[in-house]
Amino acid sequence: MVRAHLEQTERHGRCRQTYAREQEHTHGVHRFQLECSNWHATGKWTKDVTAAEVAALVRAFVDAALAAQEGRPSPGTATGAG
């Protein structure tokens, strides 16, 4: 889940697609190696994700799934009250 989230949200410059690979997990930190679809031009970089960040991501995913199941807007979704 975290890998997919990083691939959707992390960008390097003007890259269109980011690819993430989990490198290691130590002391509550997941380290990912990210690379752009234009990796030859932009290179690679790392992103550390803490256990607390993973928990928040999973909680947001579950809340959104429950909201969709109940037919209500998910938390964080802007509603246009006119």
Image (cartoon, grey):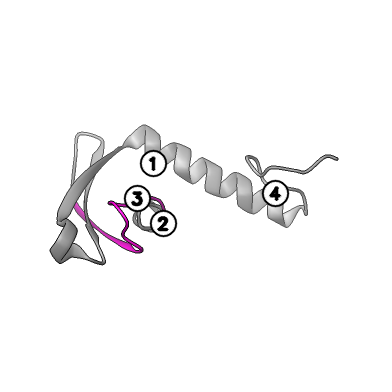
| Horizontal relation, residue 30 to residue 67: left or right | left
Residue at x 40% of width, y 51% of height: 9
Residue at x 85% of width, y 40% of height: 82
Kind of residue sitting beneath label 4: Ala
Kind of residue sitting beneath label 1: Val
The magenta stretch spans which residues?
A: 9-23
- Tag 4 or tag 1, which sits nearer the N-term? 1
Tag nearer the camera, 2 or 4: 2
Kind of residue sitting beneath label 2: Gln
Q: Which mark is residue 54?
A: 1
Provide the residue designation for mark 3: 10
Residue 16 sits in which quadrant? bottom left
From what the image shows, is residue 41 above or below residue 6?
Answer: below
Please check the rendered image and state whether residue 22 is part of the magenta-colored stretch, yes or no: yes
Q: Are marks 1 and 2 in contact (CB under 8 Å)?
A: no
Provide the residue designation for mark 4: 67
Tag nearer the camera, 1 or 2: 2
Quadrant (top left, top right, bottom left, bottom right) of the N terminus? bottom left
The residue closer to the viewer here, 19 or 16, is 16
Secondary structure of residue under mark 4: helix
From what the image shows, is residue 46 above or below residue 51?
Answer: below
Q: Gap in Å between the C-alphas at discs 2 and 4? A: 21 Å
Q: Gap in Å between the C-alphas at discs 4 and 3? A: 26 Å
Secondary structure of residue under mark 3: loop
Indicate the position of residue 60 as horizontal and vertical percent values.
54, 43
Provide the residue designation for mark 2: 8
